Image (cartoon, rainbow, N blue to C red):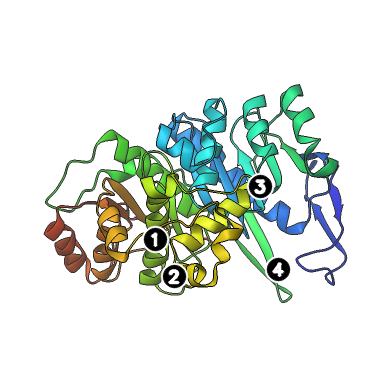
Amino acid sequence: MKEFSLKYGLNPYQTPANLSVADGALPIQVLNGRPGYINFMDALNAWQLVRELRAATGLPAATSFKHVSPTGVGVGLPLTDTLKQAYFVDDLHLSPLAAAYARARGADRLCSYGDWVALSDPCDRETAALLAREVSDGVIAPGYSDEALAILREKRKGGYSVVQIDPDYEPNPLEQRDIFGVIFSQGRSELAITRDMFQTVVTATKDIPESAILDMLIAQITLKYTQSNSVCYVKDGQAVGIGAGQQSRIHCTRLAGQKADLWWLRQHPQVLALPFRADLGRPGRDNAIDVYLSDEWEDVLADGVWQESFTQRPEPLSAAEKRDWIKTLTGVTVGSDAFFPFGDNVERARKSGAAYIVQPGGSIRDDHVIATCDKYGIAMAFTGLRLFHH
């Protein structure tokens, strides 16, 4: 099949719409559902991310995508009991692939609502069981076990989108796009991200442990497929905060840092012990936690709206308690798709536990950025590689 017809494009009024390849057959098969234009944009970008991450780390990888950027990325490392509870997966047996998706989904559960999922390995029963109970639009993987496919075909009353991609497919090295009738051509972004790129450590602190090297790989590969400008915070094998598509570097760093802070706050004992109503679903719990940790919580208490989510009135976390908890977050790796122009990015990253930074370098103020890292004992590697993605 060289062409696949779609119901419409980005919006319902944009017709006709289809997928096609110039040569050969499309590398995808739709096994269930009816994916749309945006679904396929997410699927093909997400697949490239997990394929490259699998090749770079040797670990199963998963990502949760929304609007052509990842909300979370993870590799198949075991989860702590705290993370299992925070991610609502403490009742499941997790295969390495399922653990990768639990990490990808759990990093930013609010934004990953209604996600498109990409899996680096054939989907197994454990991963399908996790997917079955999350609000998700579809999944792309190089294959599916019979049990997994049967589970996924029951999701969304049989309408869940399941796409299989040929893992051996390689596109034409020249990519093209049409913008307002003007055709752009460029060489595809095929330079592989490897550990060798992190050897130029420019700070006084030189030691970067293997765990941080893994996190640097995750950060840089994630950024390679995230809408620019972008910054990514990574901790223990998963992206915990992604700032995508911002016009300034510092706004990327702040946005990603805020998300990393929320990820960490979700693991606060007081949050883990929130008395949810038994009839409150998983998305409802995500929303309730988000409000509980926001500045709106005092208003919710005053209005009595808390009763819609909780069996009893939860005591708030004070601003001081939140700050103190966030200060316990350490060992975070921060990556940037282009150079940090000022030391303010380092200052903000430090507040969310940054101990390692990886970025291209090349700013006229590199000396100031390095000095800011040295001020806090942060190790920073320059890659010399910009990773813009649009």
Q: Which secondary structure, mark 3?
A: loop
**Which sits in the foreground, 356 or 166?**
356
- Residue identifier under label 2: 298
In the structure shown, which secondary structural element does the residue marked by tag 4 occupy?
Answer: strand
User: Which residue lies most toward the front here?
Assistant: 312
| Label 1 or label 4, whichever comes before in sequence order | 4
Up/down of 280 relative to 10, above or below:
above
Could you give the CA–CA distance between mark 1 and mark 3, rounded to whole angstroms? 22 Å
| Distance (Cα) linking label 2 and label 4 | 49 Å
Q: In terms of sequence position, does the residue under pointer 4 or pointer 3 come before the other?
A: 4
Tell me residue 329's x, y (percent).
29, 49
Q: Nearer the viewer, residue 353 or 328?
A: 328
Q: Nearer the N terminus, badge 3 or badge 2?
A: 3
Distance Cα–Cα, label 1 vs label 4: 51 Å
**Which amino acid lies under the numbered mark 1 shown in the image of this protein?**
Pro
Decide: few, some or many residues near mark 3? Use Cα within 10 Å; few <14, some 14-19, many ≥20: few
Q: In the figure, is residue 158 to the left or right of 63?
A: right
- Relative to residue 345, is residue 142 depicted above or below? above
Q: What's the amino acid at mark 4?
A: Asp
115 relative to 299, above or below: above
Q: Nearer the viewer, residue 184 or 203?
A: 203
Q: Which residue is under mark 4? A: 178
